[in-house]
Amino acid sequence: MLSHLLPLITSLPLTLSSPTTPTPTPTTTTCNGHPSYCNTPYSNLTFLASHDAPFIGPLPQQNQNLAIPDQLDLGIRFLQAQTHFPPATDDKDSLHVCHTSCILEDGGSLEEFLGEVKSWLDGHPDEVVTVLLTNGDNAPVESFGKGFEKVGLDGYAFVPEKAGGLEIDEWPSLGGLIERGKRLVVFLDYGANTTSTPHILDEFAYFFETPFDVTNGSIPDCSIDRPPGVNPDGRMYIVNHFLDVDILGVLVPDRAHAARTNAVTGDGSIGAQSDSCQSLYGRKPNVVLVDFVDKGEVMEAQDALNGVSASPLPNSGSLLSRFKNSWLYVYCVFLIIYLQD
């Protein structure tokens, strides 16, 4: 019996997750999984966001457990990534997604990361995704622009029609973005120039952020960290809701308490910090950045902040994909091999 089970289990994810990408079909039934979002301005929604999305694995410098497509399948629609140049390169178009430096954690080229986003968008025509990139090496914005062009994502990106950018109440609805075929919104923290590269928007022209590198488990701080001294009125805002732990003077993601940090309610939860910030600024956060999006109640918190019922569950292919990439899958395979012997 066990000899028959081994081929079945080792081939199961490949067998059941192999259907080709569905052909996009226009529809206005739902936007990002909810009918009400179709008429909701982008600036009125709260997105639970994947902090350091491309840095995946069990090591201390890694912030996520799921691959990019699986994060999107889970319901994440806002991806943040750090960028740097690899060591010993003079090529100003060779940006990689790297955590702090490409020696510490190299998640691959910017094009590889963007290619995963494009592939997912192509299979999900009623979804809007946001990408926030950080410019750790002060690269020219044209280098980022070329990355989008190489994978064919530049045509997906939203460009404000109004010269000088949009006021907070001028953003289109998700339905409007979908109907225009502009289902990607891109921000860069430093170095944006919408004259030369109009589809890469200046993050701090539209947002302010709360402090990061927090080690207090209550994550109580809603003060403005960046840009310093800015007036919060008229700007969307990002809550940095990820907890670090200090190990011999080095801050690393607090994986052990991720479920509590990513809970809907309770001390140090997504809901608790969001409520504190809403009390301070008179409106809910637009983005809540979290580590380990698969831990806790991330999507439940997003639904609660947006006042909607539970998001649809991921499809079976997504669940199998996550199982295939989990330690549980590896353990099951080796257990069956052991029992067979």
Image: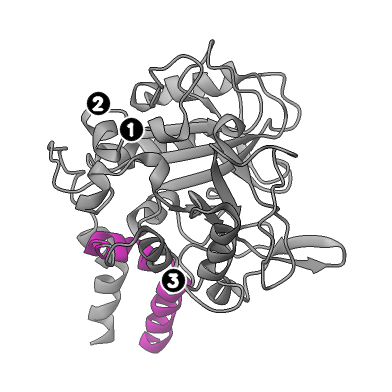
Residue holding disc 2: 180
Residue 333 shown in magenta: yes
CB contact under 8 Å: marks 3 and 1:
no
Q: Which mark is residue 172?
A: 1
CB contact under 8 Å: marks 1 and 2:
yes
Q: Which mark is residue 297?
A: 3
Disc on the earlier residue, 2 or 3: 2
- Mark closer to the observer (1, 2): 1
In whole angstroms, how far apart are the C-alphas of marks 1 and 2? 10 Å
Q: Position of residue 204 (x, y in %)?
A: 61, 33
In whole angstroms, how far apart are the C-alphas of marks 2 and 3? 32 Å
Q: Position of residue 211 (x, y in %)?
A: 70, 53
- The amino acid marked with disc number 3 is Glu
Residue 289 found in image quarter: bottom right
Q: Quadrant of the N terminus?
A: bottom left
68 vs 43, nearest the viewer: 43
At 73% from the left and 48% from the top, the residue drawn is: 104
Majority secondary structure of magenta residues: helix
276 vs 173, nearest the viewer: 276
At 56% from the left and 45% from the top, the residue drawn is: 237
Left or right, 320 with reference to 24: right
- Position of residue 196 relative to residue 247, above or below, is above
The 10 Å Cα crowd at callout 3, few under 14, some 14 to 19, many 20 or more, is some
Q: Quadrant of the C terminus?
A: bottom left
At 51% from the left and 62% from the top, the residue drawn is: 65
Q: Position of residue 179 (x, y in %)?
A: 21, 30
- Mark closer to the observer (3, 1): 1
Q: Which residues are magenta?
A: 312-341
Disc on the earlier residue, 1 or 2: 1
Determine whether the residue tagged by mark 3 lies in a helix, strand or loop.
Answer: loop
Q: Position of residue 10 (x, y in %)?
A: 32, 68
